[in-house]
Image (cartoon, grey):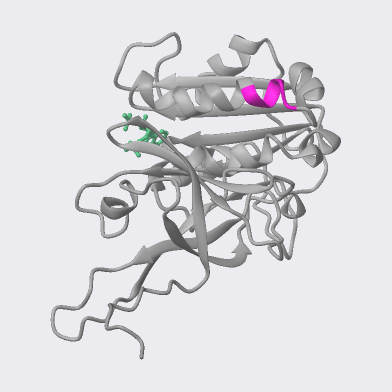
Amino acid sequence: MTPDKPSPVILPDAQTVTEVEHYTNSLFRFRLTRPASMRFRSGEFVMIGLLDDPHPETGKQKPLLRAYSIASPAWDETLQFYSIKVDNGPLTSKLQHIKVGDQLILKQKSVGTLVHDALTPADRIWFFSTGTGIAPFASLLREPETYERFNQVVLTHTCRDVADLKFGKELIADTKSDILVGEEAQHKLLYYPTTTRETSAKMGRITTALEDGSLFKNFKITNFNATNDRAMVCGSMGLNTDMKRILENYGLREGSNADPGDYVIEKAFVG
Ligand code: A2P
């Protein structure tokens, strides 16, 4: 006879947490084991999550899933994610408490527009991000194809406070010492971090630095043009709308997986 004991909750598509690092009260990153069969393109996102609290009457638990950009390259053995923490957020109020060894739900199907296949060839690629919108670029910056396709790679990251930039600063350092892309990144990669609320070396929204030209002056690089430049955008709704206008004023045309163009915006991104 089997002794009476509560049956363990079996998570569908379960993966194990292998690393957790908290940056601020509202930002953290974590890594999950990667299913051996999982394939994705650097820059894509997947659905991940947890089981919701048991229903008060039925005791049933429903999966609580959200779209998360994979913040590690397609060749990496584990999957990294970068997340906000919202105390009353349905998923992140729980997700922020995960520990190494816990299990999360990961749906393997990956999709997204921030992929090399959606852009036509050019000389320079720009990755424009705000907040956790830097996540897909943490994948693309460590992707060898980025340096094979472009002679210059510029990452811009705008956050409210200096502490919010730490993930990006570490990403740049890790990319420049990366065994696969480090050497190329050392001479091709430019990084432009800015803050909008706390004082730092470079202040203000990236949209302002683009429109007043200070971004180009700062690096002593040529201005934008539709022949040389390609762009990917990931961040707040406001950033998406403003960047679309700015890039189109420069003459860039929006691309997609089906019809590659000059720039792409991740509309599914959840800050
Ligand atoms: P700001 O402080 O001026 O709003 P959030 O934390 O609200 O998601 O914002 C993250 C960063 O994105 C902040 O630094 C914010 O600047 C900036 N931001 C918000 N909207 C835009 C926009 N339309 N264009 C450029 N940057 C933006």
Q: Residue furthest bottom?
A: 1
Q: Position of residue 155 (x, y in %)?
A: 60, 28
Task: Tell me what residue is drawn at x 62 percent, y 20 percent.
Answer: 173
**Magenta stretch holds residue 176:** yes
Taking the magenta stretch, the answer to whether it contains residue 227 is no
Dividing the image into four equal quarters, which quarter contains ligand 1?
top left
In the rendered image, which quarter contains the N terminus?
A: bottom left
How far across and down, in percent of the image, does residue 267 sit? 50, 56
Q: Position of residue 153 (x, y in %)?
A: 71, 28
Toward the front, the furthest residue is 1
Prevailing secondary structure of the magenta residues: helix
Left or right, 150 with respect to 42, comes to right
Q: In the visual, does 199 lie left or right of 179?
A: left
Residue positioned 74% across, 49% down in the render? 116
Q: Nearer the viewer, residue 133 or 258?
A: 133
Q: Is residue 151 left or right of residue 43?
A: right
Res. 4 visible in picture: yes
Which residue is rendered at x = 71% and y = 32% of the image? 225
What residue is drawn where x is 68% and y is 49%?
A: 42
Provide residue 171's location: percent of width, then percent of height. Answer: 58, 28
Q: Which residues are magenta?
A: 174-178
Query: Does the rendering let one see residue 210?
Result: no
Q: Quadrant of residue 121?
A: top right
Foreground: 45 or 239? 45
Is 217 placed above or below 21 here? above
Query: In the image, is residue 48 above or below residue 252?
Result: below
Furthest residue in direction right, as rendered = 148
Number of numbered discs visible in the structure rendering: 0
